[in-house]
Amino acid sequence: MADQVSSEARRRFLKMAVAGAAAAPLCALAARRLRAQEQVDPSSELAQQLGYVEDASEVDVEEWPSYEEGQVCANCDLFEGAEGDEYGPCQIFDGNLVAAPGWCSAWIEKTA
Ligand code: SF4
């Protein structure tokens, strides 16, 4: 009887552990979205180091020669906003919000 109870408890524990492991990435994404409340200040140190601007048409191409016309945050692989969002979380800025028409030197072409 005790063996049956302990086996049942072990099975229940394993089910909960598997469910918890499966939910972990979703919890991390939800946590990042909750944290992503602040807009990135273009005058902040990291933004300055990366040449972040809220409007890609204002990129100083002499200072940032890697910039190519058409590159904006909205089509960057590190942008996590939905299509049509004015601002969205950016992985480079720890999930803080960047402007969809913005740009920085970490821009990477969206793959999907
Ligand atoms: Fe915009 Fe991409 Fe730079 Fe983030 S990494 S600020 S989404 S260009």
Image (tube, rainbow, N blue to C red):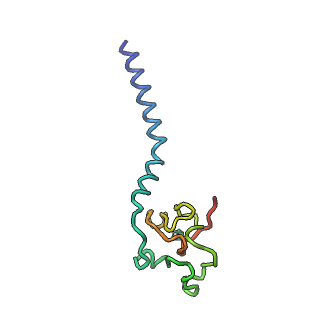
Residue 66 position (above or below residue 19)? below
The residue depicted at 40 percent of the width and 57 percent of the height is: 34
The tally of labels here is 0
Quadrant of the image occupied by residue 78: bottom right
Residue 57 pos. (x, y %):
57, 81
Residue 88 position (above or below residue 43)? above
Which residue lies most toward the top here? Answer: 1
Q: Nearer the viewer, residue 33 or 44?
A: 33
Q: Is residue 65 left or right of residue 17?
A: right
Residue 30 pos. (x, y %):
44, 52
Quadrant of the image occupied by residue 83: bottom right
Residue 81 pos. (x, y %):
52, 62
Residue 40 position (above or below residue 14)? below
The residue depicted at 40 percent of the width and 16 percent of the height is: 4
The residue depicted at 53 percent of the width and 74 percent of the height is: 102
Residue 61 pos. (x, y %):
58, 85
The residue depicted at 50 percent of the width and 79 percent of the height is: 51
Q: On the rendered image, what quadrant is the N terminus found in?
A: top left
Which residue lies most toward the left here? Answer: 2
Q: Nearer the viewer, residue 2 or 71?
A: 71
Q: On the rendered image, what quadrant is the C terminus found in?
A: bottom right
Residue 61 position (above or below residue 89)? below
